[in-house]
Image (tube, rainbow, N blue to C red):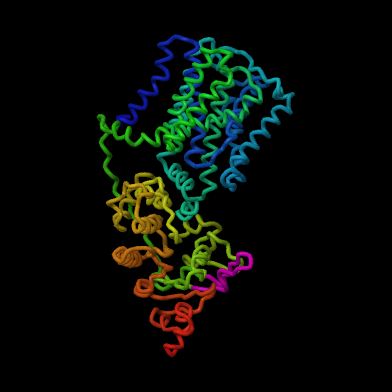
Amino acid sequence: MAHPRVYVALILLSLLLIVPALSDSAFIIHVFVTICVFAGLSTAWNIVGGYAGQLSLGHMMFYGIGGYTTALLIQHLGLSPWIGMWAGAALSAVVAVCIGYPCFRLRGPFFSLATIAFLEVIRLLAIHFHGVTGGSAGLIVPLKLGWAWMIFQDKFNYLIIAFGLLLLTLVVSYAIRNARLGYYLTAVREREDAASAAGISPTRVKLKAVVISAVLTSLIGSFHAMYTTFLEPATMFSLSTSIEVAMFALIGGLGTVVGPLLGTVLVVPIAELARGWLGASANGLHGFVYGTVLVLITLTLPGGLVGTYGARVGRWIDRLPGGQPRPEQEAPALRQITGTPGETMLETKNLVMRFGGLTATDDVSMMLKRGEILGIIGPNGAGKTTLFNQISGFLQPSSGSIAIVSGGKATTPASPDAFARAGIGRTFQIVQPFGKLTVIENIMIGAFMRHPDVASARAVALRVSSLVGLQHVREVEARNLPIGDLKRLEVARTLATEPDILLLDEVMAGQSQTDTQTMVALIRAIRDAGVTVIAIEHNMQAIMSLSDRIIVIDSGKVIAQGDPQSVVRDRRVIEAYLGEDFANAQGL
């Protein structure tokens, strides 16, 4: 509470109560109730649409479910809305899981279209079951005055409840953004494959987000139904309102805590005051106001208000009393890697991967021994990365088997995140940083797998950043790094998961000689710390000096394996790299 960001936020939020209280105008109170309602809806939507990057345009289905459930429980069972709103929230959570689980497998506009379709289906059901819902004629909430029934003559009481719900959504949004779930959602939004490689289940974290968002949206819908005392499907399940709610977050700044609130405070009063002053002649004017502000913000501030100015304002606020940074926590002990050197850790048998008529890996069998550095080489297109994708769970082999051996037991995880949790960490041939996160936050994404607490994960990330030589850029956004630092960042993020086996996919590609030497030294230090390494590399000098054993793949087949000295003189290897004529000229 003593931090300036907290007390400044509370002071500004209190104005939502103080200004209407001083005005003593029923209309001004109505405007501020509307601000609180739509800011709460937008903040709840932002958990899915901003943090997780899932553009749900049918989010008002949860608003409508909450409102109708609460009203029907009052009408038929005489339950207080304070109880009914939680029943509506529970129903919304169930619907969110039933809709989200299949729809989260969709990408881009298809997910948005699916949410619109479900919104329309629920709206039509509300119309069809007119005996229960009142159909298109609507449903009137029984008018029972008092706090027990959430209906008042004094409008300021509504504002108190609306403000409380807004505060609840902001607290939940803030808690998520600054907890492991918030980092996970951002990682999934930025790079889903890289998130999976860090042990994150994308579907699971997105389902958590949509359930939390649905519950908050439903609670606000229940209150708003009590405020309007009339429900009808076109309003309660409105596509245009769903778009408006998303638009407020976009104007204020997607994926930020205060962005949706700021966007609502900027736009809603203009529209509501215009309608109040101009009356019926301003019918539809709010849509014009929303559209105009959206166009201006999109053209001039594509990151939204908070995305553009938030960091600058935050630095100003941090200069206020109490804004000193907290001391960093000491890093917890890393997981101890145990086992007998030389024992089998990973085994593949007869791996075949077909893409239509193309066979990318053809009967590939290999063993990985604890404590070794295994190099995998071969010409471009030989199938090396396809092999990596299979032994890290990103591709399911057409045939053959993969076994991770631990404690004498062989297991085959079912998904990339399960492979990561089983102790296999990997980098990617084309670097996949979480561009909008800082270097230290990127590394924290990996550290969260073993250290759920944010402070502990940050302490581990600081230690790893120092190990790989990134401490000088730890607060720089990853998208601003040169290729050498990006390669080291990939290794750092993977190391933070504390793997038993580290898969390095061309981590020296495109680097300077100095960066290459640094990476070679780093890989040796990683192996000396107990991590077993498999490395794909085209830098022959580096991979030959590093590796204890080499496997050569050509056209999807293993053509040679053994120690580097014997492999480099193998005729088949020379033919694969330099051609048959060169091999003949060398007398091989």
**Name of the residue lying farthest toward the bottom:** 587
Place of residue 333 in the rendered image (x, y in percent of width and height, measured from the top left): 33, 54
**Residue 456 visible:** no
Place of residue 81 in the rendered image (x, y in percent of width and height, measured from the top left): 58, 22
Q: Is residue 361 above or below residue 38?
A: below
Quadrant assignment for the C terminus: bottom left
Q: Is residue 241 left or right of residue 173?
A: right
Q: Main secondary structure of the magenta part?
A: strand
Q: Is residue 192 above or below residue 289?
A: below
**Residue 252 visible:** yes
Q: Is residue 570 above or below residue 253?
A: below
Quadrant of the image occupied by residue 563: bottom left
Q: Residue at x 47, y 81 (%)?
A: 579
Quadrant assignment for the N terminus: top left
Quadrant of the image occupied by residue 149: top right
Magenta span of residues: 348-366
Q: How many marks?
A: 0
Quadrant of the image occupied by residue 304: top left
Place of residue 415 in the rendered image (x, y in percent of width and height, measured from the top left): 54, 57
Q: Residue at x 59, y 31 (%)?
A: 62
Which residue occupies the foreground of this view, 434 or 426?
434
